[in-house]
Amino acid sequence: MRILIVLIGFVFLFFSCKKDKLEDGKEIFIGTWNWIYTDHEYYICIGMPQEEVLTPETEHRNYSMEFFEKGIVKFYENDNLISRDRLIFAQYGNVSGFGAAYTSFDIYLNKYNYDKDNYIQGAVSSDTLIFKRLFPFKNNDCSKYISYFVKE
């Protein structure tokens, strides 16, 4: 009997974990997205901002991510899995600054609280995904990255 109660408890905890299924317009994320380039601004903190464009060719790396209907995303570097995370949408559906074809979003990975180390801001259209932070490069006080992905 005790084993049955423990088993029911684990099943309840497994299914009660918050994650957002990709529905109500969020289905646009489902599939594989490949990195094409990143706009990188650096030396911001010393007052001499510089800009460069990073690509798979300049960085000698490929990045991609795969979104699943159940609210899971997998991140890859050179086809090697580097992370598997649950999606928790803080915001989805506002018009973005990237144009009418894009919808903006704020997503936390695996967290209920506002943890900026696991926070993605961006915009999505039917064939382009834009991340303003986190993947494949993390922003800091002196560098900012805006990364562009295309749907496979």
Image (cartoon, grey):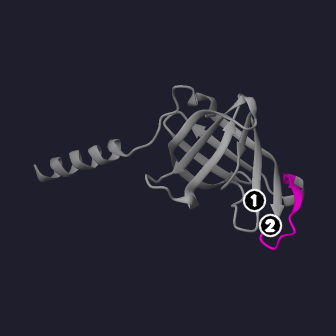
Residue 114 sits above or below residue 72 on the image: below
Residue 32 sits above or below residue 79 on the image: above
**Residue 114 place in picture, x, y as percent:** 49, 56
Q: Could you tell me the amino acid type at mark 1? A: Lys
Any part of residue 128 in sight = yes
Q: Nearer the viewer, residue 52 or 136?
A: 52
Q: Residue furthest bottom?
A: 46
Q: Which mark is residue 9?
A: none
Q: Nearer the viewer, residue 33 or 102?
A: 102
Mark 2 vs mark 1: give the one in front.
Answer: 2
Residue at the spot of label 2? 44
Q: Is residue 47 magenta?
A: yes
**Residue 58 place in picture, x, y as percent:** 89, 58
Disc 2 and disc 1 in contact, CB within 8 angstroms: yes
Q: Residue at 61% across / 33% down in the picture? A: 94
**Residue 53 place in picture, x, y as percent:** 88, 54
> What is the secondary structure assignment of the residue under circle 2?
loop
Quarter residue 150 falls in: top right
Q: Is residue 91 magenta?
A: no
Tell me which segment is drawn in magenta.
43-56
> What is the secondary structure assignment of the residue under circle 1?
strand
Residue at the spot of label 1? 144
| Mark 1 neighbour class, 10 Å CA radius: few under 14, some 14 to 19, many 20 or more | many
Q: Residue at 76% across / 51% down in the picture? A: 146
Q: Residue at 57% across / 31% down in the picture? A: 26
Q: Nearer the viewer, residue 74 or 124?
A: 124
Q: Earlier in the sequence, mark 2 or mark 1?
A: 2
**Residue 109 place in picture, x, y as percent:** 53, 51
Any part of residue 127 in sight = no
| Mark 2 neighbour class, 10 Å CA radius: few under 14, some 14 to 19, many 20 or more | some
